Image (spheres, rainbow, N blue to C red):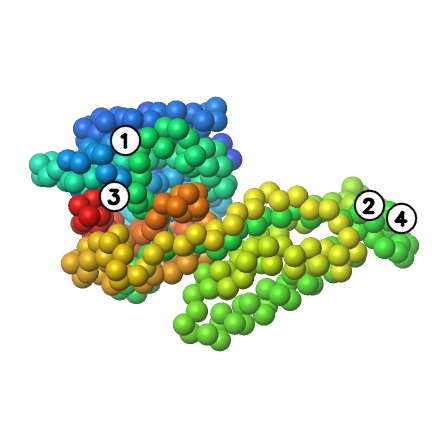
Amino acid sequence: MAPEVTKFREYIRLKTVHPEPDYTSCREWLLNYGAEIGLELVIDKEYVAGKPVLVFKLEGSEPQIPAVLLNSHVDVVPVEEDHWCCDPFSAFVDEEGRLYGRGTQDMKCVGIQHLEALRRIKEAGVTLRRTVYISFVPDEEIGGKDGMGYLAPSSEFDKLNIGLALDEGLAREDEDVTVFYGERHLVWRKVTFKGNPGHGSRFIEDTAVEKVRKLLNLALDYRAVQKKRWENSPCMTLGDVTTVNVNIINGGCAANVVPSEFSVVVDCRISHERKLKEFDDMFQDWINQAGGGEFEDLHHCDNEALSSVETNDPWWNAITGACQSKGITLKPEIFPAGTDSRYLRNMGIPAYGISPINNTPILLHDHNEWLGVDTFLKGIDVLQEVVSRVANV
């Protein structure tokens, strides 16, 4: 087994899984890893107790010019173990060379690839023009507020003088690799409706659940229109349309009591074809049509900033040129979900999401998440070339 794969498997076995991620063990493991490579530790801080943020440095020959940041999150989403073919934290490798485990695609693979790319650059005796930083942050899977949300605006981060950031992407089933230069606006909204209570045997008027039904109809009708647009437009990607999904419904106290209150949580990812405020106004109109209710934004992010994909942009040229040299065609898209890159783009820092995973099904957050060992190793080669070129711009 290649030593890079051994490291990858060790990382998968660290249970940084929500709702109780083991960040302590992960921190110690990463500190040892960085020291083994010979990287300088520049940030080791808990902006929120129990949630460490680590940043390592490989200094360039011109440390005064803007640096490059390689970012990854250490946390992973929960698993339903009964639906897995193996222990999701065993890092099992089957006979076809598929490494199974939560985080193999999202995104522990990229964290290891970043580290191993720097190891190779360092061991080759190459000094890059720009300093390269590599960050490991918590909580991306639950919004990133206590991770990159605190790191990005901090005084420690400001001293790094970041000019470009690379973060995570998605797998792709064909020969190409997707690169993400922006994200949809993100809204997680909890709406609470109140209505008349009563006995479950009666026709109670103006109940909370009636209002919920009206909101669901409006939201899901809109969803259906967007889905049809996406399905009928071959050139459209998921990031080009708006998705609306109702993910949580809460309420009720007994089987024979009409409750006075129901709440729903709606997950909205809004495309760049409209402003976030326009969507907010439409959503408020849905609430009004449903009979009126109160809402709380669990997460509300205007991701208006986009990174350049123009041919005259030096960062973009370096990234595309590196991939072309490895026989890879990049497909630029808007990321359909959310990543830590939004915090950086909203500060004016160009950020691109790229996971060099092709010829592989998209399995992030899915049962039996896996990544081919050969694909993982080839990804190190790709990211080594990308890092070398952007750090010499």
Q: Is residue 109 above or below residue 178?
A: above
Residue 372 at x, y percent in the picture: 27, 52
Q: Which mark sits nearer the N-terminus, 2 or 3? A: 3
For this view, does 82 lie left or right of residue 56? Answer: right
Dot in front, 4 or 2: 2
Q: Secondary structure at mark 3?
A: helix
Residue highlighted by disc 2: 260
Mark 1 vs mark 2, CA separation in Å: 53 Å
Could you tell me the amino acid type at mark 3?
A: Gln
308 and 258: which is toward the camera: 308
Residue 63 appears in the picture as rendered: yes
Residue highlighted by disc 4: 199
Residue 322 at x, y percent in the picture: 19, 55
For this view, does 252 lie left or right of residue 190? Answer: right
Identity of the residue drawn at 70% across and 59% down: 286
Dot in front, 3 or 1: 1
Q: Are marks 3 and 1 in contact (CB under 8 Å)?
A: no
Residue highlighted by disc 3: 113
Q: Which mark sits nearer the N-terminus, 3 or 4? A: 3
Mark 3 vs mark 1, CA separation in Å: 14 Å
Residue highlighted by disc 1: 56
Q: Which mark sits nearer the N-terminus, 4 or 1? A: 1
Mark 2 vs mark 3, CA separation in Å: 53 Å
Residue 368 appears in the picture as rendered: no
Mark 4 vs mark 1, CA separation in Å: 62 Å
Give the residue at the far left of this rendering.
125
201 and 245: which is toward the camera: 245
Could you tell me the amino acid type at mark 1?
A: Phe
Mark 4 vs mark 2, CA separation in Å: 11 Å
Q: Which mark sits nearer the N-terminus, 4 or 2? A: 4
- The answer to which image quadrant residue 173 occupies is bottom left
